[in-house]
Image: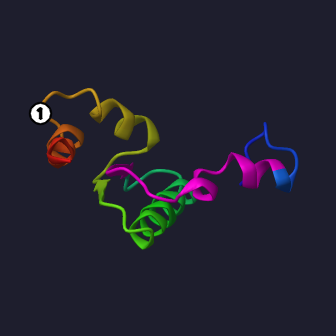
Amino acid sequence: MRPRFLDEQSKETSASPLAFVDKPPPFLIAYGSDDFPHLRKQAQVMADTLRSAAGEVVSIELDGCDHLGASYMAGEADGPWVTAAAWIHTF
């Protein structure tokens, strides 16, 4: 699925964060188990790409969350996003 603002393949490639993975900082990638299928796949591809560039990656699937629910969980002080991100401060 191509976002509406990307009307050409060349724009899609240049807008993708995958095109800029070199020496990545630590990453937390989170997505909902009920998120849009193409976004779940994108999250997995991004995590794999970062790992292949020797990046430190934690990837979590938020059970029962759709796209909006996964975003709301980011605001929970003791939620899974914060818990999973705690390791980043060690870098």
Name the residue at 84% across, 56% down. Answer: 9
Front in this rendered view, residue 31 or 29: 29
The residue that label 1 is drawn on is: 78
Query: Is label 1 in a helix, a strand or a loop?
Result: loop
Residue 69 percent across, percent down from the top left: 36, 37
Name of the residue lying farthest toward the right: 8
Residue 15 in magenta stretch:
yes
Front in this rendered view, residue 71 or 65: 71
Residue 30 percent across, percent down from the top left: 35, 49
Q: In which quarter of the image is residue 23?
A: bottom left
Establish if 81 lies above or below 8. above
Name of the residue lying farthest toward the front: 23
Report the span colored magenta. Answer: 11-31
Q: Is residue 44 toward the left or the right of residue 61 in the image?
A: right
Q: Quadrant of residue 70?
A: top left
Residue 1 percent across, percent down from the top left: 71, 54
